[in-house]
Amino acid sequence: MNLRTFARISIWASMLGVSFVGCSGSNAEPDESNEPGTRTQAALTEETPFTNPLRIPPVMARSSTAGAAAATLAAYNLTIKTGTAQMRTGNPTPIVGFDGIFPGPTLVVERGETTTVTQTNAWTENVTIHNHGHKVAAESDGHPVDYITPGSSKVYTYPNDQPAGTFWYHDHTMDLTGAHVYNGLAGFYIIHDAAEDALNLPSGNYDIPLLLQDKQFNADNTLTYTSQVGGFLGNTPVVNGVANAVHNVANRKYRLRLLNGSDVRLWNLQLRAGTTPQTFQVISSDGGLLQAPVSTTSLSIAPGERYDIVVDFAPHAVGTSLSLFNTDATAPAISTLMQFTVDRTETDTSAVPSALASIRRYTEAESTGSANITLAFANGNWQLNGLTYDPARIDITSPSNAVRIWTLTNNSGAMHPFHKHLVEFNVLDINGQPPPAHENGLKDTIQVPGRGTVRIIFKNEGFTGTYVFHCHRLGHEDHRMMLQESVTP
Ligand code: C2O
Ligand code: CU
């Protein structure tokens, strides 16, 4: 990190009440061990009861639609600016957000319609905006140094030529993604398609996006964030920007679109009635529907990952409260993220069919090339293939329209959620074993266990150019655990 960058961060940080901790230069890996000195953290201050109404981000109105042609164009305009969000009781919390709100407005589009999003930077910092999980041209991918400078605008074009699913748009600025996302630059981007619509899954008011994060509040409700090589762990859960949130539900099925937008925190989720974990169904992974629903009582979700689940509240009497509960013990431990209270009866005509989608899968036999990527901690920083990110360097070249296998070998003790841009991949195996059913669909982010190995298979297609791949623990990413791939014709 050069001094200019540090000065820039410090100036910005002082405006939003953020402190900055550079990397210590220590060779001790700052991962799950949580040694004092590698990570600043506060004691847990989880509050009860859960009485703040859940915020559902508004669906963004299109500024124009043109005709009913095959590729209808929808245009959106968003302004990046400071604002406030009521995150808990007391003062509203200063944020920087899309249109000044947090989470940003939800964009809902149909598969195959092209959208343009004009992002205007009315803030004081450089930004760059990435649609996570979208197959887009490199110029619209939010490359880490493809800045929208203060006072300027950029038009991003999204073909939405991929299956229905839960995606998200967020800042991707080199060295500052963690701070920018933490302070508010994140929103949902949902693709619908006819095949999914035909399934009659819970929809409308029964289809709810949930952005799961941990924050740390000061007494005046401003936020604290420190950019550190081990990543930042907050002590207070917020869902869609609300601490101690509750959502009233009918006794019927709901689709919950879970997104882990935390800096580094892994959530091991359960839905509990009292202390009893309830069964729910996982219906989709990062890139869209699974082949079939997966019934489970727990689900692990790492930063960057999305899973849609269907929860049936029908077995619960009116008046029952259920907790979205985290069993991961990382300190400061957070147990309940939010609650649902069944407050009414309703009839339910939605369904969860036993067959959801046919998944595009590549096989090892189709692969015409491979690469090895190591994940490690050395010389005070995270590394991929022994390197830290340099936007001027190409690290891997791969031809488009060719099936590739990447072997991800984790030589560190920490789990790293590995994220590749441009296309969704399939997981071939995890530590030599076939992936569990919920990871056996379309993925763009995969947990590589500590000391573990994961093989992914994909075909770059649609676009050529320079795309990054990185750890999605944002503190790791900002400490340059990122490389770039040149996708060639
Ligand atoms: Cu969600 Cu490269 O990012
Ligand atoms: Cu990492």
Image (cartoon, rainbow, N blue to C red):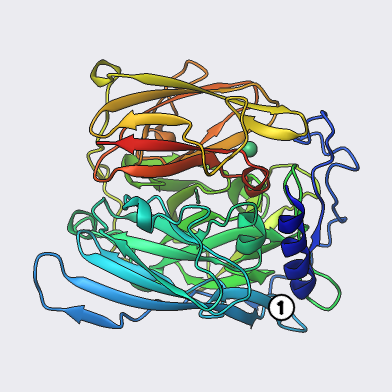
Percent position (x, y) of residue 24?
Answer: 84, 40
Q: Residue at x 91, y 42 (%)?
A: 36
Q: What residue did someone put label 1 on? A: 93
Query: What number of labels is visible?
Result: 1
Outermost right residue: 36
Q: Is residue 195 left or right of residue 278?
A: left
Outermost left residue: 69
Observer-nearest residue: 176 or 344?
A: 176
At label 1, the amino acid type is: Thr
Observer-nearest residue: 167 or 275?
A: 167
Q: Is mark 1 within 8 Å of ligand 1?
A: no
| In the rendered image, the vertical position of residue 33 relative to residue 199, given as above or below | above
Disc 1 element = strand
Q: Residue at x 69, y 69 (%)?
A: 243
Q: Residue at x 25, y 74 (%)?
A: 74
Q: Is residue 299 visible?
A: no
Percent position (x, y) of residue 136?
Answer: 32, 53
* Quadrant that contains the C terminus: top left
Percent position (x, y) of residue 61?
Answer: 34, 81
Image quadrant assignment for residue 191:
bottom left
Observer-nearest residue: 433 or 347?
A: 433
Percent position (x, y) of residue 188?
Answer: 45, 64
| In the rendered image, the vertical position of residue 226 relative to residue 93, given as above or below | above
Image quadrant assignment for residue 54:
bottom right
